[in-house]
């Protein structure tokens, strides 16, 4: 007999994230999970050990007997608990896996499906290390890469249609730091048409590969509160949990969520091999942050909207990059269709170039001059000389990452205090 369910179903995600998965009976009744700092687990019997290894090796399926834990490089209770709590945050997710950084999550998800001769298409600007991973590191192993400017739907469609042996389309939206949005649903539809339509006769490799291309989205900047890639048709949603999910700039972590449990099995298999699972203490910390991610992100988005809109038109600022200030109709349409709120990140282009940007950063008293984003405290940085300093000048100019650009990740402080801090920093004469 199935267990009688008396609560409203389906539960909304704010409830689900607090009530799903964790069973106090497994932690001597503690209301919050314990931290299981153990590298290895005692088997309930030799037969159970054999069964656990058979399941791991793909020689048996997990059944009603359950599967004993084995070794913490493969899996551990705190990873299972936080993964159970991550799934309801991402609409349409079937499974989650946690990693010891965002880069570990991105690398492992991609390596779970790539082979030499495959092609990866990615939008640019994309997080710098992701670009190096795809174009330099994967390139050594014979994976081709094609960069397409973020927000150019026609160019992305054309690249998807013409790439040979296309395996992954990786979208980062909005792009960082120019806040350009790429239409995720459109890219997913183009990939689906390619896979189901004339693929069998095509000369671009899809007819000969049994596996269709996957759309992966780095959802770090807008998710999980405001943008839902899996519901838009993507196969994989990726996170640097270091940012909004962790929320306090005190842990490094990463998350992969998939719609398909079979794909997640492959990704977990690679995680076991690479040994890049998130450690128990960090899993426990991340788990405590998940129930407030929507609250924090909503406040951060409200704050950012007030501040970005108030700074728009300031005589010392050439342009404010923020979704509610999009001038381009195509960008506005994507934002309206794809995002519930505009988010906590904006950039300002100071008319005085690099000296003005540096002076602004020096004068800030409340916001701090640091890279990273998504924490409860406001951070500001100069992308051209820091996060994007490896780029060529022409590429920076083409992407709108000018000498005067400052990127701001807004926290949960009072927005009027922050606006005052920014306006005061703008008023100071140049050093
Ligand atoms: C959009 C985005 N993706 C991925 C990463 C990499 O995350 P981590 O630093 O946790 O490895 C970052 C880091 O800044 C990022 O901003």
Image (cartoon, rainbow, N blue to C red):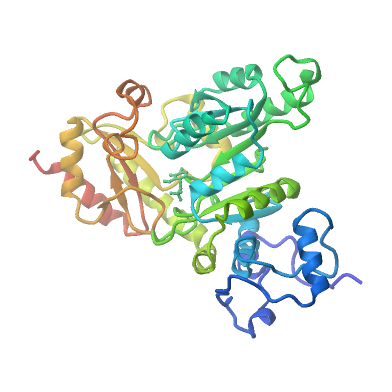
Indicate the position of residue 210 as horizontal and vertical percent values: 78, 30
Count of labels in the image: 0
Q: Residue furthest bottom?
A: 28
Q: Quadrant of residue 163?
A: top right
- Visible in this render: residue 5? no
Indicate left or right for 122 with 270 as reference: left
Residue at 80% in and 15% down: 201
Indicate the position of residue 65 as horizontal and vertical percent values: 84, 70
Indicate left or right for 91 with 416 as reference: right
Residue at 33% in and 24% down: 392
Q: Residue furthest right?
A: 1
Q: Quadrant of residue 388?
A: top left
Indicate the position of residue 195 as horizontal and vertical percent values: 75, 26
Quadrant the C terminus occupies: top left
- Location of residue 360 with respect to 158 vertically, above or below: below
Indicate the position of residue 48 as horizontal and vertical percent values: 80, 71
Residue at 73% in and 14% down: 203
- Location of residue 121 with respect to 49 vertically, above or below: above
Indicate left or right for 49 with 353 as reference: right
Indicate left or right for 103 with 11 as reference: left
* Of the pair 149 and 145, the residue shown nearer to us: 145
* Of the pair 80 and 274, the residue shown nearer to us: 274
- Location of residue 394 with respect to 66 vertically, above or below: above
Residue at 34% in and 58% down: 377
- Visible in this render: residue 373? yes
Quadrant the N terminus occupies: bottom right
* Of the pair 1 and 271, the residue shown nearer to us: 271
């Amino acid at each position: 007999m199935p267990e009688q369910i008396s609560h409203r179903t389906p539960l909304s995600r704010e409830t689900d994230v607090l009530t799903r998965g964790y069973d106090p009976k497994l932690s001597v009744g503690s209301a919050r999970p314990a931290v299981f700092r153990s590298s290895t687990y005692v088997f309930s019997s030799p037969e159970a050990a054999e069964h656990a290894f058979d399941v791991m090796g793909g020689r048996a399926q997990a059944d009603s007997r359950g599967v004993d834990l084995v070794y913490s490089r493969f899996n551990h209770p705190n990873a299972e608990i936080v993964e159970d709590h991550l799934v309801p945050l991402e609409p349409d997710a079937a499974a989650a896996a946690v990693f010891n950084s965002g880069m570990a999550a991105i690398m492992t998800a991609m390596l779970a499906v790539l082979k030499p001769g495959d092609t990866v298409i990615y939008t640019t600007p994309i997080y710098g290390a992701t670009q190096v991973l795809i174009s330099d590191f994967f390139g050594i192993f014979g994976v081709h890469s094609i960069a397409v400017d973020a927000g150019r739907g026609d160019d992305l469609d054309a690249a998807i249609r013409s790439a040979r042996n296309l395996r992954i389309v990786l979208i980062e939206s909005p792009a960082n730091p120019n806040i350009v949005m790429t239409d995720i649903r459109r890219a997913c539809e183009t990939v689906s048409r390619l896979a189901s339509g004339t693929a069998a006769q095509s000369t671009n490799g899809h007819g000969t590969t049994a596996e269709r291309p996957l759309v992966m989205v780095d959802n770090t900047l807008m998710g999980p509160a405001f943008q839902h890639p899996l519901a838009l048709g993507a196969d994989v949603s990726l996170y640097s949990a270091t940012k909004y999910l962790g929320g306090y700039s005190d842990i490094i972590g990463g998350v992969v969520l998939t719609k398909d449990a079979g794909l997640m099995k492959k990704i977990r298999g690679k995680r076991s091999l690479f040994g890049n699972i998130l450690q128990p203490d960090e899993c426990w910390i991340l788990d405590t942050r998940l129930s407030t991610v929507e609250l924090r992100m909503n406040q951060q988005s409200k704050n950012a909207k007030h501040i970005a809109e108030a700074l728009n038109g300031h005589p010392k600022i050439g342009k404010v990059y923020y979704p509610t200030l999009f001038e381009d109709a195509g960008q506005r349409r994507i934002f309206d269709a794809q995002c519930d709120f505009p988010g906590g990140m904006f950039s300002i282009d100071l008319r005085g170039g690099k000296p003005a940007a540096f002076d602004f950063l020096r004068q800030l008293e409340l916001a701090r001059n640091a890279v990273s984003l998504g924490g409860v405290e406001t951070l500001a940085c100069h992308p051209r000389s820091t996060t994007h300093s490896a780029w060529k000048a022409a590429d920076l100019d083409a992407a709108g990452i000018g000498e005067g650009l400052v990127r701001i990740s807004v926290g949960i402080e009072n927005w009027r205090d922050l606006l005052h801090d920014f306006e005061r920093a703008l008023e100071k004469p140049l050093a």
